[in-house]
Amino acid sequence: MRVGLFIPCYVDQFYPQVGMATVEVLERLGIEVDFPEAQTCCGQPMANTGCLDDTRPLADRFLQIFSGYDHVVSPSGSCVSMVRHHYEALFHNDARLHHLSEHTWELCEFLVDVLKVEKLPVRFPHRVGLHSSCHGLRELRLDACSERMGNQHSKVRRLLAGIDGIQLVDLKRCDECCGFGGTFAVAEEGVSILMGVDRIEDHVASGAEVMTATDASCLMHLEGIIRRRNIPLRTMHVAEILAGRNWQ
């Protein structure tokens, strides 16, 4: 299969190691990964702020660049959700969008739903808390939501649980927002920080050494609070753990 690697803005600018870890995970599974250098922002920040006229050119560019791939994979639940669920409002009945909306995947769901991965040959001997980012949780259904009834499965937790040496801690409020929310963190700074502190305290109380998530943007927000308050907790994107990276 021909897989295009979609790297979000935050990863490209601040966490390039997350993109490299994503490539490492995919190539280890025999996937040939192509990174189209012409790619830019998917338009999510503009769309979240209501600037749809500014979003449309970026979304159109995304469609032009990635339409030729069998699958598109990204280490970001929020950006994948933008393509899959919100491009339709910009491009009605576009054949390119029909294909991409069904074949653009967050890394973990691609591993579980497409490649049918059961276990990765890596080791991560640490206590880990999983922060379920909102877009991945409630739009992609990567994890279980407390407001939903019936049996639910966490694709992310399933992959992490198969890693040798890892200890997944149980959080009291496993599906709460961290408070980032893109421009929400700017417009409502105080509320955003308090929400982030709640998430961090939940991880610390649960005995986590590392906090992980599928979105670098959430981790960036939480990492800032952790550093300013000197809290003994590390942040790592899930792709880094799946690649067997170690912070020690």
Image: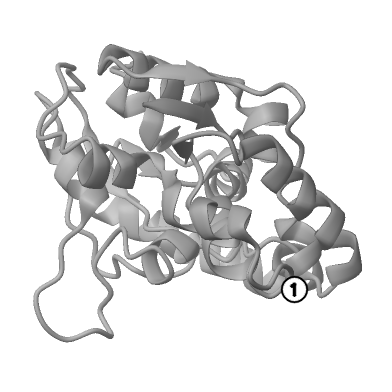
For the N terminus, the image quarter is top left
User: Looking at the image, which is closer to me, 159 or 193?
Assistant: 159
Relative vertical location of residue 42 with respect to residue 175 in this rendering, above or below: above
Residue 85 location, quadrant: bottom right
- Please tell me which residue lies in front, 167 or 44: 44
The amino acid type of the residue labelled 1 equals Glu
Q: Is residue 181 left or right of residue 139?
A: right
Q: Position of residue 88 (x, y in %)?
A: 63, 70
Q: Position of residue 9 (x, y in %)?
A: 70, 38
Direction from residue 110 to residue 236 in the image, left or right = right
Residue at mark 1: 188
Q: Within 10 angstroms of label 1, few (less than 14), some, or many (20 or more) residues?
A: few
| 172 to 25, vertically: above or below | below
Does residue 81 appear left or right of residue 129 in this picture?
Answer: right
Residue name at image x 53 percent, y 29 percent: 5
Which secondary structure, mark 1?
A: loop
Q: Residue at x 82, y 75 (%)?
A: 50
Regarding residue 225, the answer to whether it shows in the image is: yes
Q: At x 51% / y 45%, what residue is drawn?
A: 76
Tell me the quarter of the picture where residue 93 sits: bottom right
Q: Is residue 207 visible?
A: no
